[in-house]
Amino acid sequence: MQPKPKWEKCRVTCPEENLETDLLLKWHDQDGKKVLDGVKCQNPKLMDMKPQDCEWSCWEEVENPKP
């Protein structure tokens, strides 16, 4: 049986639009280590029906935050 994922909300400055946006992060535990499993961005420009894609991947920055 797989453990339930843990969800976390964080706020970042989006380099695509230089605005504050929320990310919903999905984590799972793998051998006692917290591993990022998914990111949902709440940037309104990327969430509506406009044909606009994000050119920046926040996965690495979220998983390895700067001190």
Image (tube, helix red, strand yellow):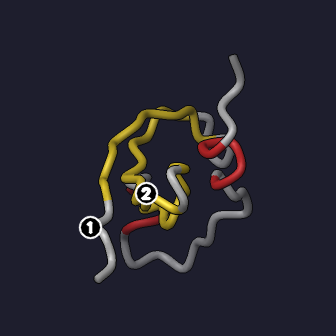
Position of the N terminus by quadrant: bottom left
Classify residue 31 as left or right of residue 22.
Answer: right
Instruction: Report x, y in % for residue 46.
Output: 48, 64
Q: Secondary structure at mark 2?
A: strand
Q: Tell me where residue 3 sits by quadrant.
A: bottom left
Residue 45 in sight in this render:
no
Q: Nearer the viewer, mark 2 or mark 1?
A: 1
Q: Tell me where residue 21 sits by quadrant.
A: top left
Identify which residue, 21 or 44, lies in the foreground.
21
Pointer 2 residue: 27
Classify residue 60 as left or right of residue 28.
Answer: right
Pointer 1 residue: 4
Residue 57 in sight in this render:
yes
Identify which residue, 7 or 53, lies in the foreground.
7
In the rendered view, tell whether residue 33 sits above or below residue 18: below
In three-dimensional space, the C-alpha distance between marks 2 and 1, rounded to whole angstroms, equals 9 Å
In the rendered view, tell whether residue 11 sits above or below residue 54: above
Classify residue 2 as left or right of residue 29.
Answer: left
Look at 41% across and 53% down and name the residue there.
25
- Name the amino acid type tagged 1: Lys
